[in-house]
Image (cartoon, rainbow, N blue to C red):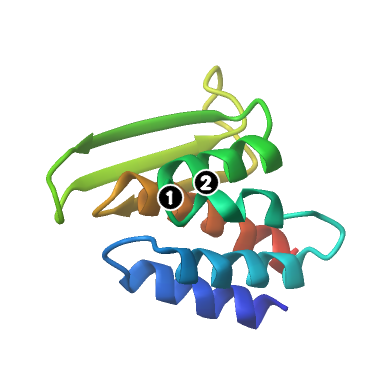
C-alpha cells in the first residue's frame, strides 16, 4: 500500500504537468492506501482542469484545512509553493504538508501526497 503511494509520489515530483493519466495513477495509489475513503470523485475534472481536480481532492479529504499558495505564473516553468495545515491560527499542527512545483496543481498535489504518505505510514 505505502509502496504504491511512494512510487506515485516520486512520479509526481518528477512531472512538469499534471495530466489525466498521472492523476489517475495518484487516485489509484490513494485508493489502495486508504480503501475506506473515496478518491475517485474528482477524476473527471483532471483532464481539462487539473488545478480544480486537486483543489476538490484537498477540499474533500482535508475539510476546513488552511491552504496557502504562493507563486509566479509562467507558462511551462512557474514556481509555485503550497502549504496545507490544519489551522492557520497556530504553529504547532500535528500534520503539515508542503509542496513545490512548476504548476499550481502539482504544488498542491505534492503537499497533499506528503500528508498522505505520512498518514499511510502511521
| Residue nearer the viewer, 11 or 47 | 47
The quarter of the rendered structure image containing the C terminus is: bottom right
Question: What label does residue 39 carry, if any?
Answer: none
Quick check: 63 above or below 99?
Answer: above
Q: Is residue 38 left or right of residue 18?
A: right
Residue topped by disc 1: 50
Q: Is residue 46 left or right of residue 76?
A: right
Quarter occupied by residue 6: bottom right
Query: Looking at the picture, how far across and down is residue 74, in whole percent?
Result: 12, 44
Quick check: 97 above or below 11?
Answer: above
Residue at 62% x, 80% y: name it.
4
Callout 1: SS: helix
Total labels: the figure holds 2
Residue at 43% x, 39% y: name it.
83
Q: Are marks 1 and 2 in contact (CB under 8 Å)?
A: yes
Characterize the local packing of mark 2: few (<14), some (14-19) or many (20 or more) Cα atoms within 10 angstroms.
many
Characterize the local packing of mark 1: few (<14), some (14-19) or many (20 or more) Cα atoms within 10 angstroms.
many
Q: Is residue 75 left or right of residue 84?
A: left
Quarter occupied by residue 101: bottom left
Callout 2: SS: helix
Question: What label does residue 53 carry, if any?
Answer: 2
Residue at 52% x, 39% y: name it.
55
Query: Looking at the picture, how far across and down is residue 97, in whole percent?
Result: 50, 47
Quick check: 115 above or below 6?
Answer: above
Query: Looking at the picture, how far across and down is residue 78, in whole percent?
Result: 17, 48
Q: CA distance from mark 1 to mark 2?
A: 5 Å
Q: Residue furthest top?
A: 89
Residue at 78% x, 63% y: name it.
34
Query: Looking at the picture, how far across and down is residue 30, in whole percent?
Result: 67, 65
The quarter of the rendered structure image containing the N terminus is: bottom right
Q: Is residue 91 left or right of residue 38?
A: left
Amino acid at each position: 500500500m505505502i509502496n504504491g503511494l511512494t512510487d506515485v509520489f516520486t512520479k509526481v515530483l518528477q512531472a512538469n504537468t499534471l495530466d489525466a493519466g498521472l492523476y489517475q495513477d495518484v487516485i489509484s495509489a490513494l485508493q489502495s492506501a486508504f480503501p475506506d475513503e473515496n478518491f475517485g470523485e474528482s477524476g473527471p475534472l483532471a483532464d481539462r482542469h487539473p488545478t480544480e481536480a486537486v483543489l476538490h481532492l484537498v477540499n474533500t479529504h482535508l475539510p476546513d484545512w488552511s491552504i496557502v499558495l504562493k507563486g509566479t505564473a509562467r507558462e511551462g516553468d512557474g514556481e509555485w509553493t503550497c502549504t496545507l495545515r490544519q489551522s492557520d491560527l497556530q504553529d504547532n499542527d500535528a500534520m503539515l504538508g508542503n509542496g513545490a512545483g512548476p504548476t499550481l496543481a502539482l504544488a498542491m498535489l505534492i503537499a497533499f501526497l506528503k500528508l498522505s504518505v505520512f498518514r499511510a505510514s502511521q
